[in-house]
Image (cartoon, coloured by chain):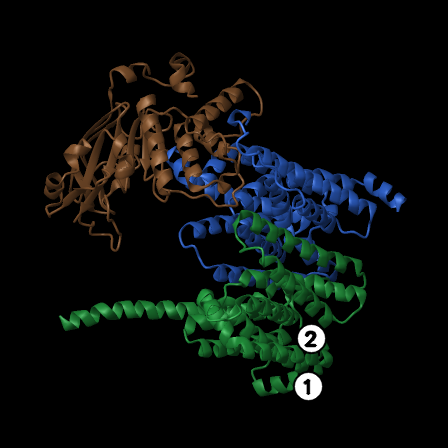
Chain colours: A brown, B blue, C green
Amino acid sequence: MNPITGTPAAVTATRPETAPPAPTRAETPQPVLELRGAAARVGGRTLWSGVDLTVRAGEFVAVLGPNGVGKSTMVKVLLGVLPAAAGEVRVLGGQPGQSAGARIGYLPQRRSFDPSLRIRGLDVVRLGLDGDRWGVPLPFGAARRRDRERVAEAVDLVGAGAYAHRPIGQCSGGEQQRLLIAQALVRRPEVLLLDEPLDSLDLPNQSAVAALIGRICHQQGVAVVMVAHDVNPILHHLDRVVYLAEGGAVAGTPAEVITSETLTRLYRSPVEVLRTADGRLVVVGQPEAPSTHGGHHAAV
Amino acid sequence: MTELAVSAWGQPFFHNAVLAGTFIALAAGLVGYFLVLRAQIFTGDALSHVAFTGAMAALAGGYDLRLGLFVGCVAAGLLLAGIGRSGRADDVVIGSAFAWILGLGSFFLTLYTTSRSGAMGGAGTTVLFGSIFGLSTGQTLVAVLVAVAISAVVLLIARPLLFATVDESVAAARGVPVRVLGFGFLALVGACAGEATQAVGSLLLLGLLAAPAGAAIRLTDRPFRALALSGGLAVAELWAGLAASALIPSLPPSFAIMAAATAVYGATFLIRPQRAPLGTASPAAG
Amino acid sequence: MPQSDGPTAFSWNLLADFQQMWSYPFMVNAFRAGAVVAVVAGAVGWFMVLRRQTFAGHTLSMVAFPGAAFATLVGMSLSLGYFGFCVAAALAIAGLRRDGQPGGAGESAATGVVQAFLLACGYLFMALYKGLLEGPQALLFGSFLGITGDQVLILAAVAIAVLAVLAVMGRQLLFASVDPQVAAGRGVRVRLLSTLFLVLLGAATAEAAQITGALLVFALMVLPAATAQQLTARPGRSLLLSVAIGLAVTWLGLLAAFYWPYPLGFFVSTFAFAAFLAAHAARALAGVRARQGRPALLGGAA
């Protein structure tokens, strides 16, 4: 079912454009993302600072924190859209933004497609492959077949084969999100940056998409950084979490970070982490960021 | 009737009309596809008003009609691109402003017709409803060159423009110059409006932009196939219209072209859009 | 053009000018027709702007042109062409809307195609009617020449009917326009009102098109109402203001069109647009003053 894991040799053979040798990344994970004392400022206000984080291939990291604390800004810093205000940020061994495109897959915050948009899901995935090239794709040739196989492979990987031929506007929210993940994956990136991919999905879809991302991360050896509103759907798949607070941050395994002591220290006000009978975590007393009002945030 | 048709086929004005019309329709079909996909039909409507006023202002000022047409339309396209991004001005404001611009066009029309000899009275009708049979050889050449240039640019930017239209934030993250493309596209729409005015007139150019593209989008979900279909349909509809008005001399070509375009668009509502049956579709078949 | 009709040079002796103008029966008719149309368009247009149905109004005005052109072609009365086509189109729009709310790329393409086709039909009718001297300009951009006493009577009769219906359903229509869901919950028949209003809109558009021309209907239908809604938030006052602005703009336009050889629609749309811009500027200025005034007050208190 899965052509990438099924035939690793074939994958490396059809991957001439990737600069570093790919096979090493499964066995001896190199740091693909490194942040040392990184900070972000937007409009003169420091959102977060002192972030120390190392992400290796095949690791699943969640970025957590209250509304308005700058979780999406973290993704922008990693993409190189916004420069870090302090510290060092290295992405795939270089400056952020240098090697963007082919080696980083990016899924922005929830986009919804107009129901009347008559473009197939396949074409949206395909745009992730070559949408930034000028001209029109030629309707013949070897390149066309190779591109089609790549698109089919990505669609298979997310299990979207059944509806990839429908206009994307007529797909459900969960189906659209899977197709967009396929779009982010179609260039076989080494890093996947996901901004609230579970937002506005219903509960069964949340856990299904979370499981899909976890599977891609661990089986394909893709490093995943995911901004999340609620840690519970992804808790079982996570390797590390980064908790952002105004002015500070703390990173580590979920068991280390999501505790009453750590979060109380981070927010400098009493925060209590409760574990429900079914293993869900509930954070009580977490302060809202000062710039947002009325943003409601009951569970982590 | 038959003699008339035979005579029309052989006339140089008819050859000019077919030559210029083919390329103008091709450009309009290609531009129109993205116009419909980006839901900017309203822009086309606004440009049709500006086309009339621009052409009339140029005539009243003693310049070539096409100068006013292109300058007015491209400038208005860029202006709308600017407004559309930042202000998101109210529909009522834009609609009213363009109604007034049309009124201004009627002012220039009267200024022009009263300051020249009475023989110029048809200028307003020419610009409003087009006179494709009135193109001279020189005008045809310019129209063909501009239309070819517009089509070439649309094909060049087609893929990034599609990316930016469907999925703006990812396209921007991937280094597609989304904003520049937006401006460039509306400038192209402006140039295309100037071209289409020469064929079907400023009031009807919206139909030439919207009808083939709307039909193509209803017929296929594949973007590049739809783009090609839109251009092809526009050319075919123009040919059908020209042939009809050559056969029936009392039928104005602009009306015949619009009738063909509307008929094709209407016919697509009779065909249910094809959809792959659920579960059996294979993604590799794309 | 009226300049050739007699000694109609504009002097600054306004009374003499007015008497001179009044001596032409067609001018008297034009002023009467203008008044009737301005009142209807101002009132119906006010509800149209409130209900954000300017797009429907735009489409209906495009129907006015083929309506009038068809009437010219087959030799029936212009009024019948205007009203028949516009009301039929209003019923068609109401019927089509039942399927669901308009919106999206496909819908807007359909609207564009329909509008262009309607204008093309109007052009066909004009081209088939060979005896035309002035071309389609009078129908598109408005003219006050040749308005007959009968036409004024028809305009007035339709206007009275429209205003009567509007008066009967006005309060419910306001409720349904502002808050359709609550209104439906309170037993207001929202759909019936919506259909009825579209028919009124068709009739009002047909009236306005006879003064401003089919292309410039916005000048009387939208601009006075939008100007009035800028100036006051009270429904009753704003409705009256809309009618008053429409009346002033139309009569000023007629006055100007009598003395200068440019189309009536140009003058009416220019005056209406100027009033609209002035209202916008006045409100922006008031806003700036209010913002500047507040810190000064706070500073005085501290």
User: Which residue type carries mark 1?
Assistant: Ser
**Name of the residue lying farthest toward the front:** A277
Residue C17 location (% of width, % of height):
61, 84
Mark 2 burial class by Cα count in 10 Å: few <14, some 14-19, many 20+: some
Chain assignment, label 2: C
Q: As drawn, is C276 to the left or to the right of B231?
A: left
Q: Quadrant of the C terminus of chain C?
A: bottom left
Comes first in the chain, label 2 or label 1: 2
State which quadrant residue A187 falls in. top left
The residue shown at (25%, 31%) is A238
The residue shown at (56%, 82%) is C12
User: Can you identify the residue that label 2 sits on?
Assistant: C2
User: Can you identify the residue that label 1 sits on?
Assistant: C23
Q: As drawn, is C164 to the left or to the right of A69?
A: right
Residue B65 location (% of width, % of height):
63, 51
Residue B115 visible in the displayed image = no
